[in-house]
Image (tube, helix red, strand yellow):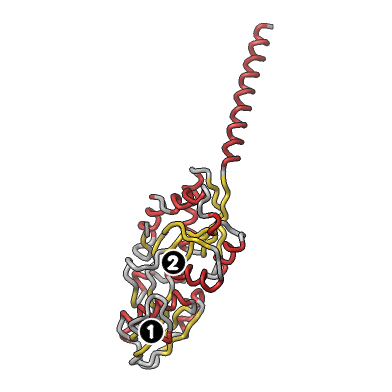
Amino acid sequence: MPVGKGLSKRNLVLGALAAAVLVATGMAHAQDTTIRIAVTAGPHAQIAEVARKVAARDGLVLKIVEFQDYIQPNAALDAGDVEANSYQHRPFLDSQVQARGYRITAVGNTVTFPMGFYSKRFKSLADLPAGARVGIQNDPSNSGRALQLLQKAGVIQLKSTAGISATVADVVANPKGLKIVQVEAAQLPRSLDDLDAAAINTNYALQAGLVPTRDAIAIEAPDNPYANLLAVRTADKDKPWVPKLVKAFQSPEVRQLVQSQFSGSMVPAF
């Protein structure tokens, strides 16, 4: 009988400990916050996957939602289908907010992707012949970026007042009579066969097997004004999960990924 009583007491103690662990675990999970974050497929999704693991240590559960274009992630964020996104630079965000009235706010920088021009026929922009067909993006912020790169290469000249939002209407000199064709950004890699050269955003270039530091015939300097951003709805910008999200995307783990796997095609902007 004494042995039985001892076992009984022992079982009660073990049971109480197990219950305490379950309660503590339940409380920990109850404190977790789940955030849906929109990204474009490719490098942004890779970065988000590393950030997801980092965020989990702070009780922030990231659910990654991938998109294939630049328009839907902001629409999804503004509509409340996701709580954050990571894929765009500030000029693009500003143009979207102005054009569509989105209530979206940037809360931190992530990485910079120097944009490049690519060609299957020519080794440099200077080699383009008269009347060459040159593809650029059809959204205002990225098309302006491509036009600035063409100007830097000396093949066109823009108005002195044209900044990062330059348009084809700002071209004041085009000695070679280049035919500038505007195409949706995601389609530009597929259009290379039909174009003499094309400006391609690095995330789409990498998806197409193009390595900017190896294949680009012209490329932006890494210290350009197009750092990519984490964005949230303006109403959420002061929520307690936002600093945790920024911390995860600006973590040493993300920096290590960028520096070890992208060979200068992408650089940290934090």
Residue bearing the label numbered 2? 90
Residue 28 - label? none
**Residue closest to the eye, 149 or 92:** 92
Task: Pick the quarter of the image with the N terminus.
Answer: top right
At label 2, the amino acid type is Arg
Secondary structure of the residue carrying tag 2 is helix
The percent position of residue 227, horizontal first and vertical second, equals 40, 64
- CA gap, disc 2 to disc 1? 33 Å
The percent position of residue 209, horizontal first and vertical second, equals 44, 70
Secondary structure of the residue carrying tag 1 is loop
Residue 8 vertical placement versus 257 (above, below): above
Task: Say few, some or many: other residues with alpha carbon within 10 Å of mark 1 (under 14 / 14 to 19 / 20 or more).
Answer: few
Residue furthest toward the top?
Answer: 2
- Name which residue lies at 42% across and 69% down: 202
At label 1, the amino acid type is Arg
Q: In the picture, residue 64 is in which quadrant?
A: bottom right
The mark lying in front, picked from 2 and 1, is: 2
Residue bearing the label numbered 1? 121
The percent position of residue 268, horizontal first and vertical second, equals 37, 59
Task: Say few, some or many: other residues with alpha carbon within 10 Å of mark 2 (under 14 / 14 to 19 / 20 or more).
Answer: some
Task: Pick the quarter of the image with the C terminus.
Answer: bottom left
Q: In the picture, residue 168 is in which quadrant?
A: bottom left
- Name which residue lies at 46% across and 62% down: 43
- Name which residue lies at 46% across and 85% down: 181
Q: In the picture, residue 222 is in which quadrant?
A: bottom left
Check contact, mark 2 vs mark 1: CB within 8 A. no
Q: Earlier in the sequence, mark 2 or mark 1?
A: 2
The percent position of residue 113, horizontal first and vertical second, equals 39, 66
